[in-house]
Image (tube, rainbow, N blue to C red):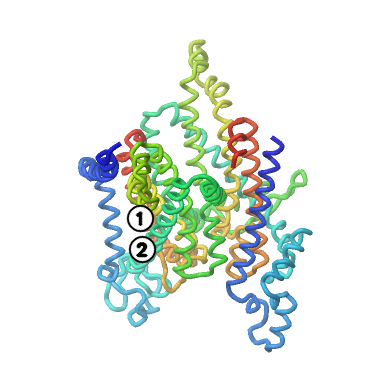
Amino acid sequence: MFAFILRRTIQSVIVLFVMSLLVFCMINLVGDPVDMLVNPESLPDEIERVRRDFGLDQPVYSQYWHFLKGALSGDLGKSYVFGRPALALMAERFPATLELAFCALIIAVTIGLPLGIYAGLRPDGFATRIMMGMSVLGISIPTFWLGLMMIILFSVILGWLPVSGRGDIGVFLGIESSIFTMDGLRHLIMPATNLALFKIAMVMRLARAGTSEVMAQDFIRFARAQGLPRKRIIKSHLLPNILIPIVTVIGIEFGTLIAFATVTESIFSWPGLGKLVIDAIINLDRPVVVAYLLFVVALFLTLNLIVDIIYAALDPRVRLQGDDT
Amino acid sequence: MNAKDTRAAVSSPLAALSKCANALWSRPSVSISGLFVLLIAALAVLAPLVAPTNPYDLATVSILDGRLPPGQKMLDGTVALLGTDGAGRDVLSAILWGLRTSLIVAISSATIALTVGLTVGLAAAFYGGRLDAFLMRIVDIQLSFPAILVALVLLALLGKGIDKVIIALAIVQWAVYARTIRAAAMVERRKEYFEAATCLELSNGRIIWKHLLPNSVSSLIVLATLQTAHSITIEATLSFLGVGVPITEPSLGSLISNGFDFILSGAYWITFFPGIMLLATVAAINIFGDQLRTIINPRLSR
């Protein structure tokens, strides 16, 4: 088991290293960031000075070596646009993204779980058929467009919700979040729902599959034979059994939520990581783009590693299979 | 094993195709969704002929026509059925031209991805061993990241432009095809006709192209349909974010993004109608793919 974890960790570190090399070298082929750094009317020797100051006159391999040395000591370079360390910028923006993703998960579960259980209990019900028919439409709707439609409906036509930003931030138990103020919640509800939309269908499918599987089991039949009320069976026999796989999948999917947040944050001007990186890509702010990519790669590798370790712990066959590759 | 068996095995995809064709006509839902997909494709191909105006001919577009609501008459007398955008372009015409760009990007990227995926998947299945392990590890790593993120990264690295978007989407999709065709080819490898072909000492290339490929490829038909729908959405999302196709050749996504600036002033039609077209296109392809799946693999139908 230890060897398995060690090998996977080493593999992850290699992937991270290769990614950093690829990203760093390729990004140096696009555009000239010096154009973004200096005033367009500056003199040529001024431009040369800036180029030297940022080390952009060096060949790519020596720039990469410099970057790698910095990265190992926790310095991923300074943003060209903000003039501050990229890592500090990201740490500043991350809580907003985390908050958005977390609320989206809660919304996805509160809507998806009851619908999925209903569909599992009544596979041939009228409402189930409508839901399944809608789900094809659901996967076809571009979420970003739906976000715009939500703005048109709730902000422009009805005037209920604010269009953009994060709103007031409250502090509770030392955690700063918009959840703790009324204004913050009003700002949060639309982006969180938008981000939740494509996860609702997933939770629904999982809950439906789980329910139809568990309901056919003997212990449910015995509970029924005992004359337990339906509500009780669902609450204390069905729910605990279907929740375990759902929680696992949601854990894995948390990374995708953070990736998809880039789109939602751009629509609602949510001041999170995704908005930061989209602006950085458009402004050729290389250090921020590289730092964001490495962060996301590391996040996904860690999530996958954790999942693989749990699987290997539960199922020895996975471990043995891994040994001969 | 004799040659007759081998031939029978090879002709099976043809038989499957004709079975498909029969089923297409016996199931109206398939033909209806298929016809709808064809109609959308025809609209895209014929955009220059069917569109009321040419939205990119600067001589005919007038800024004075800007932001006309649907149904209003433009200066030159044409009725803007779906209104006009901020620059005075007819939204309906812009949608038809945008659909063209969206489909060109989706179809070319799917073709490239399919070719690369097929080659990699077949090579992995046929040669096995270290090559297989190596290629599949790359596929695993790539598929552990969400498609939209990979595409975003690639475009950040490659820069803007239709060709760049096509390359990015091809790189995003090849892994799915590679994994699917490999799985199908691994099953075929264990069948007797394959053994027979190997015993006849046919060349590797001939075994792969004449035997392995035709017998494994049917598994990709549905996948390619659904993937195309998926890549249309990804392209639209990227263009909406401003990292996709350039504004000079807008796709449906860039049109929606263009309308984003006007929704607060109430000019909803500039975003609304391109979105409806996008939704209709993706939904039509998805439903068609879903129906195809029930024909090819009847066990999966509910």
Q: In which quadrant is the N terminus of chain A drawn?
A: top right
In percent of width and height, residue B144 lies at: 56, 48
Kindly identify the residue that appears in the image at 27 percent across and 61 percent down. B42
Q: Is residue A293 left or right of residue B219?
A: right
Q: Tag 2: Cα neighbours inside 10 Å, few (<14), some, or many (≥20)?
A: many
Residue that mark 1 sits on: B281
Mark 2 residue element: helix
Query: At 24% across and 41% down in the image, what residue appears?
Result: B19
Q: Is residue A8 above or below residue B280?
A: above
* Chain identity of mark 1: B
Is mark 2 in CB contact (under 8 Å) with mark 1?
yes
SS at badge 1? helix
Is residue B145 visible in the rendered structure shown here?
no
Please tell me which residue lies in front, B73 or A81.
Answer: A81
Quadrant occupied by the C terminus of chain A: top right
**Nearer the observer, A26 or A167:** A26
Tell me which chain the residue with mark 2 is part of.
B
Q: Which residue is mark 2?
A: B99
B244 sits left or right of A64 in the view = left
Residue B189, how many percent across, how many down?
A: 40, 40
Q: Amino acid at mark 2?
A: Leu
How far across and how far down the image is residue A74, in percent? 77, 58
Q: Earlier in the sequence, mark 2 or mark 1?
A: 2
Amino acid type at circle 1 is: Thr
Instruction: Give the quadrant of residue B37.
Output: bottom left
Locate residue A64, reporting x and y percent: 70, 67
Q: Residues within 10 Å of mark 1 (few under 14, many from 20)?
A: many
- Same chain? Circles 2 and 1: yes
- Can residue A225 be seen? yes
Q: CA distance from mark 2 to mark 1?
A: 9 Å
